[in-house]
Amino acid sequence: MRMHTIATALPTRLAALAALGLLLTACGNESSEVSTPAPDEDGESTTAPDENGDGADGEASGDAGVELTIERSLSDDESLEPAEGFEEGTYTLTCAPTGGDHPDPETACEQIEEVGEEPFTLDTSDMACTMQVGGPEQAHVTGQVHGTEIDTEFNQRNGCEIERFEELDTVLNP
């Protein structure tokens, strides 16, 4: 019977782990090809649409990068005071090109570019959040951010939602 010692077993185990690591790394990359934009008839580079009809930057061809409708309201909890300057109402916001009737579209678009679409798509329902209430302000946001459809509620009912609301403070409370 052959006996294994640490000196003989360790290299075998390390080799197996290294092979597993390479296999997992390779499985994560479906394609490593990078497409190069094809020049148009004037010799300028263009971005060809992908299979969804979007350009390489994820924006729908010919559409604004961000198109949002922001409906701001107050919760029914009358014991909470709204932040100074918060007004109920509906705004529209577009970015690339910047527009809509949002009071500060340039700053709002800069904030969206900085944080991306995560605050719009983040689901806090299964997260451990502090039990605190930040205020009665809430917003229902619909539209799209860089090709991602948005239909979400923002409020200040717990620590996670307060943080999410504050990440988009210029967008939601200009």
Image (spheres, rainbow, N blue to C red):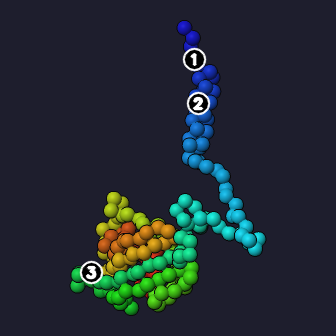
| View extreme (right): residue | 43
Q: Residues within 10 Å of mark 2 (few under 14, many from 20)?
A: few
Q: Residue at x 61, y 49 (%)?
A: 31
* Residue found at the very far front of the displayed protein: 41
Which of discs 1 and 2 lies nearer the camera? The answer is 2
Q: Quadrant of residue 18?
A: top right
Q: Which residue is mark 2?
A: 16
Mark 3 residue element: loop
Mark 2–mark 3 distance (CA, rounded to whole Å): 58 Å
The furthest residue to the top: 1
Residue 147, given in percent of the width and then of the height, sits at: 50, 68
Q: Which mark is residue 60?
A: none
Q: Residue at x 47, y 83 (%)?
A: 93
Q: How many residues crowd mark 3 within 10 Å: few (<14), some (14–19), many (20+)?
A: some
Q: CA distance from mark 1 to mark 2?
A: 16 Å
> Is residue 31 shown above or below 105?
above
Q: Residue at x 65, y 67 (%)?
A: 47
Mark 3 vs 1, N-terminal side: 1
Quarter location, residue 87:
bottom left
Tell me the CA gap for discs 3 and 1.
69 Å
Quadrant including the C terminus: bottom left
Q: Is residue 128 visible?
A: no
Depth check: give the residue in front, 139 or 82.
Answer: 139
Q: Residue at x 56, y 43 (%)?
A: 27
Q: Which residue is mark 3?
A: 75
Spot occupied by residue 135 in the image (x, y as percentages of width and height): 32, 80
